[in-house]
Amino acid sequence: MLNCRGFIFFAKYNNEIVGTVSLIKLEEENAFELAKLAVTEKYQELKIGRRLMEKCIEAAKLEGAKKIVLCTNHKLITAIELYEKFGFSFVSLENNKYLEADLKMELEIKKPINEN
């Protein structure tokens, strides 16, 4: 964890860093922002992006988060498809802090059924 403000995860393949993602704690209670998900092009067929997403969701759950948000661009079709596979849905883009972003997505994190 970075100064209680979030996480940075790296994906390593054959002793080379080939992917990264950050999970930033938001001022809003119990929420994180997923940012800077990237996988080196020649490794994109190895489902590394999927593993990074799984790690972020797991970390957010462990921190008691109720949701994860992200901003993206409509041109990043493959990334948007990945986010949708994980249950992210489109929400209104307000207070956008990223110049290239024109879409916002959100994932509500549900507690497991066996949790009170």
Image: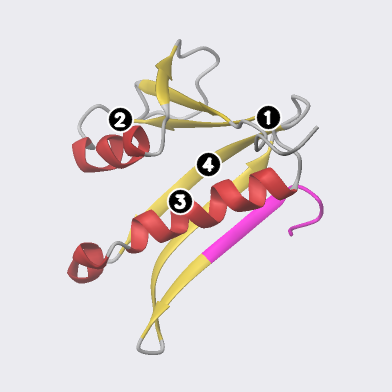
Name the element at disc 2.
loop
Q: Amino acid at mark 1?
A: Lys
| Residue labelled with disc 4 | 34
Q: Nearer the viewer, residue 61 or 68?
A: 61
Let me know if residue 91 is in the magenta part.
Answer: no
Instruction: Tell me the quarter of the picture where residue 50 sits.
Output: bottom left
Q: CA distance from mark 2 to mark 1?
A: 24 Å
Q: Which residues are magenta?
A: 1-9
Kindly indicate whether the residue at mark 3 contacts the one at mark 1 (C-beta within 8 angstroms).
no
Name the element at disc 4.
strand
Q: Amino acid at mark 2?
A: Asn
Above or below for 57 versus 55:
above
Around disc 1, counting alpha carbons within 10 Å, would you say few (fewer than 14), some (14 to 19), or many (20 or more)?
some
Toward the front, the furthest residue is 114
Image depth: mark 4 or mark 2 in front: 4
Which of pointers 1 and 3 lies earlier in the amino acid sequence? 3
Q: CA distance from mark 4 to mark 2?
A: 14 Å
| Residue labelled with disc 3 | 53
Image depth: mark 3 or mark 2 in front: 3
Above or below for 8 versus 91:
below
| Residue labelled with disc 1 | 66
Around disc 3, counting alpha carbons within 10 Å, would you say few (fewer than 14), some (14 to 19), or many (20 or more)?
many
Q: CA distance from mark 3 to mark 4?
A: 9 Å
Let me know if residue 3 is in the magenta part.
Answer: yes
In the picture provided, is 91 more to the left or to the right than 116?
Answer: left
Q: Amino acid at mark 3?
A: Met
Q: Which mark is residue 73?
A: 2
